[in-house]
Image: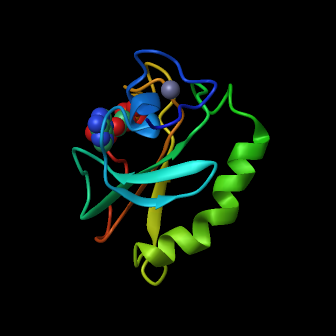
Amino acid sequence: ILSRGVNEVSDCIFCKIVSGEIPSKRLYEDDKIIVINDLNPGAPVHVLVIPKEHTENILTASPDIVTYVKSKLPELVKMLKLDEKGFRIVINTGEDGGQSVPHLHFHILGGKQLGWPPC
Ligand code: AMP
Ligand code: ZN
């Protein structure tokens, strides 16, 4: 039986992915984060960096997890082969921000030249 994070929120889809209740292919995992492909990619490379500990969004998140994700970024974008040509990080927040899953996650997109504004 896979162990579950102490802060798992029942019915949070990303907590279920973190716990393994919903299976996923993990491109990267350590004690604080997982990285998975986005189900509906918006670019040739589109992954989600999901902190294991549940928090709703960037406002509720501890600065420590944000710092941690930043510290892993060079390694992650190299793994994704985005270190040469660049990438975009997106943190959708709340209703107007287009956040559909209320568990903090960082989108990393790349693999083509992305337009702006995004929609
Ligand atoms: P957001 O709109 O910023 O909350 O992003 C949520 C993202 O999660 C969307 O891009 C979805 O395509 C993606 N997503 C939802 N369910 C899954 C899943 N089971 N596995 C991978 N990605 C998912
Ligand atoms: Zn969660």
Looking at the rendering, the quadrant in which ligand 1 lies is top left
| Residue 31 vs residue 115, the one in the foreground | 31
Residue name at image x 61 percent, y 27 percent = 55
Q: Is residue 58 above or below residue 56?
A: below
| Residue 60 vs residue 22, the one in the foreground | 22
From the top left corner, tell me how far across and down residue 103 is, in percent.
50, 28
Residue name at image x 40 percent, y 72 percent = 80
Name the residue at the front extreme: 1
From the top left corner, tell me how far across and down residue 89 is, in percent.
49, 54
Residue name at image x 53 percent, y 31 percent = 4
From the top left corner, tell me how far across and down residue 56 is, in percent.
57, 24
Residue name at image x 52 percent, y 68 percent = 76
- Report if residue 119 is visible in the image: no
Residue 16: name its quadrant.
top left
The total number of labels drawn is: 0
Quick one: quadrant of the N terminus?
Answer: top left
From the top left corner, tell me how far across and down residue 40 is, in percent.
21, 44
Horizontal arrangement in the rendering, residue 112 relative to residue 106 (left or right): left
- Report if residue 27 is visible in the image: yes
| Residue 92 vs residue 13, the one in the foreground | 13
Colour convention of the picture:
rainbow
Q: Is residue 34 above or below residue 44?
A: above
